Image: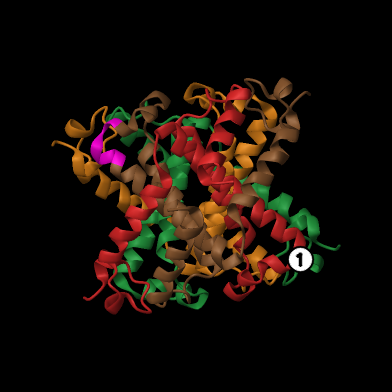
Chain colours: A red, B brown, C orange, D green
């Protein structure tokens, strides 16, 4: 399924259950952040290298996949109620970041762009 | 652009800057949750009805759109490094939720599914 | 117990279980944010007025209290490993905010201080 | 200052500015999680060992200290509006965790307690 069709499926899912009343932008942002918190809890005690192998544990892999789906679900619901074209928004953000983080300054450097080149 | 082509664009963006060393799943999950936190800060003092009109303020609308793009960007990077098919994961999650939240029990009810029908 | 004695109790608790190896600042910040996420999940679908009555439900009240304790626990562990005097840090922050948010400008206004008086 | 006197100072600070209308539990939980997100952003690209040396950079140290103060501030405001005795709540949580994580099972092991001893 495409992102748009998933967004429509989620909107229909909410409408059928009369959940639209709960899906204010404020509440959806809380739910999105709550699901990000679940991802944090999975990774919080893992060393970075361990985190890279997290999908080798079957039970853990299912959990990670489901939490990622939950984050996407709330992000798409938010895009729906705010009428944001997510793919377009991200394409534009990538172009903006291309200017903010020129390759010759940003290479191998995780510093925030305001500090680059200082 | 499709989700897959955005995911590839982001992977290329990171590779060109030699940022893959920073993009462990652990770090990406932190970045994802950090961006969700930015969304929280935009909405934290708004009444629910105000939150529904947030896009009518041009400056605020740009900010919301960019933070949403950032959340999607880190989620796609995470999907890339963990080799998760996000669209597939969400499609499966919707099917699972269809069983967990049957319409006749869930209608108008935001209770967590474990409490439904009690 | 005072904050300091709680901080020491938590340090001892971690040392007895040889958990100090997991309690890097990075990991503790993730755990702190993860627990904040649990609080978000409790409140995400509640209307603001409902959120003010959350402690009238006994089961919910226990849950809220425990999640708040967890947030404080990780904040105190973080203060311990970073050698931050939390009470002092907060006292200073209050003084700073007193200058940033003068009463005559901030009254009844949740705008961020940079926008006050504009 | 003690935790209680800081809690009172924060309540007075909010009352003087007529900010109590914004300080619903729901909004305070969002603000708390938003500040945790700021801490995440400071630590997200740091290796665990780097994170342990974060206070050696003066500018970074100020930032970490202030974000920690902000987390505590919102936690105390939440305790105030929900009438939760935070120190008591944490003391009880420590006792509960003493039973959940017995030293002989938990030593050197970050597994969640439900998995301990399996």
- Along the horizontal axis of the image, is D92 left or right of C77? right
State the image coordinates of residue D53 (x, y, percent, origin top left). Answer: 43, 76
B72 or B12, which is in the foreground? B12
10 Å crowding of disc 1: few (<14), some (14-19), many (20+):
many
Q: Does the magenta stretch include residue C75?
A: no
Q: Give the range drawn in magenta.
A: B56-61
State the image coordinates of residue A34 (x, y, percent, origin top left). Answer: 55, 44
Which residue reaches farthest left? C118
Q: Is residue A52 above or below residue A38?
A: below
**Type of secondary structure dominating the magenta stretch:** helix
What residue is shown at x 56% (from left), y 41% (from top)?
A6
Which quarter of the figure is the C terminus of chain B placed in? top right
What residue is shown at x 26% (from left), y 45% (from top)?
C97
Residue to which mark 1 is pinned: D106
Label 1 element class: helix
- Along the horizontal axis of the image, is C34 left or right of A118? right
What residue is shown at x 58% (from left), y 35% (from top)?
A10
Image quadrant where residue B6 sits: bottom left
The chain identifier of the residue carrying mark 1 reads: D
Q: In this view, does C114 lie above or below D42?
A: above
- Along the horizontal axis of the image, is D79 left or right of C106? right
């Amino acid at each position: 399924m495409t992102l748009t069709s998933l967004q429509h499926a989620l909107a229909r899912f909410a409408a059928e259950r009369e959940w639209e009343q709960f899906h204010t932008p404020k509440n959806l942002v809380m739910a999105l952040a709550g699901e990000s918190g679940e991802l944090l809890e999975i990774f919080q005690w893992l060393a970075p290298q361990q985190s890279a192998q997290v999908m080798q544990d079957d039970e853990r892999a299912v959990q990670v996949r489901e939490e990622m789906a939950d984050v996407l679900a709330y992000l798409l619901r938010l895009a729906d109620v705010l009428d944001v074209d997510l793919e377009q928004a991200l394409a534009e953000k990538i172009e903006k970041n291309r200017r903010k983080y020129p390759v010759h300054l940003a290479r191998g450097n995780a510093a925030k762009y305001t500090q680059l080149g200082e």
